[in-house]
Amino acid sequence: MDSRKPKLFVFYVISAGVILLDQAVKMIVHFNMEMGTKGQIKIFDDWFKLHYLTNPGMAFGMEMPFDNSKMILSLFRLAAMVAIGYYLYTLYEKKSPKGLMICIAMILGGAIGNLIDSIFYGVWLDNAAYNAPTPWFYGQVIDMFYIDIWEGRIADWVPILGGDYMALWPVFNVADSAIFLGITFILIYQKKYFPSKEGLQETATENASEPESISK
């Protein structure tokens, strides 16, 4: 038996942990909170709240403005889940940094968490849009974390968005948070996670010279 396999399994456990936490929070919110402002719960004064809403589109409340966008998004998430899961395996085989694999595991868990909503919630929670051709793959993602930095009507003179009422920070969920944090840490530590060829050669040279230095 390959002793390395349990180590690979740990990263998939991290993904599973994100999924379970994400789904647990969503179920608690769905069955215990009223949607919208009426059911809103303040956590830290007015700037951080629990605010139950459903999101038919992408992460952080964004939507795609064309027909069948929901089905396309759900299928894209399904393909992304498979691709990210395989990518995590290849990173492990290449002995990539543990920090990078943890980030990818978080992103994988977040992707699957929101995919579950899209595929099943239209049936399980009956929350598909009224005009959805089928409840399968048309479920709406549950969001609940609301950082209220600013909310109001944008001045009419502002190009494109003028006259719209919007919040500066969207409502999000555990899955969105895992994806955001995973990507953020990859960007912050990209030089460490994806070293240049020169950096790899220097590291190899240093490692090769270590026994000689020790022997002296």
Image: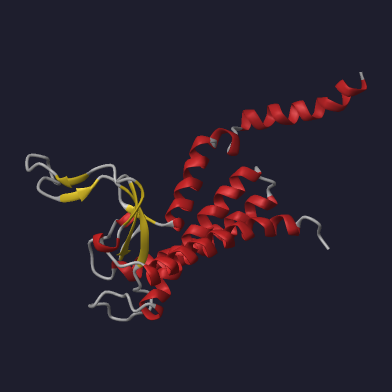
For residue 148, above or below residue 14: above
Q: Quadrant of residue 137?
A: bottom left
Q: Looking at the picture, does residue 33 appear above or below residue 165?
A: below
- Residue at figure coordinates x 59%, y 32% from the top left: 196
Left or right? Give the position of 153 relative to 8: left
206 versus 94 height, above or below:
above
Q: Residue at x 74, y 31 (%)?
A: 204
User: Residue 107 appears at what percent x and percent y?
Assistant: 51, 54
Q: Disc count in the image? A: 0
| Quadrant containing the N terminus in the rendered view | bottom right
How far across and down, in percent of the image, does residue 104 sit?
55, 51
For this orientation, the residue located farthest to the top is: 216
Q: Residue at x 26, y 74 (%)?
A: 129
Residue 59 is situated, as x and y percent measured from the top left of the image, at: 36, 56
Q: Where does the image place residue 213, in percent across and percent down from the top left? A: 86, 21
Q: Quadrant of residue 118?
A: bottom left
Q: Determine the residue located farthest toward the right in the rendered image.
A: 215
- Compare residues 198 and 137 and report the one nearer the observer: 137
Of residues 136 and 150, which is closer to you in this image?
Answer: 150
Quadrant including the C terminus: top right
Please tell me which residue lies in front, 153 or 201.
153
Q: Nearer the viewer, residue 204 or 29?
A: 29
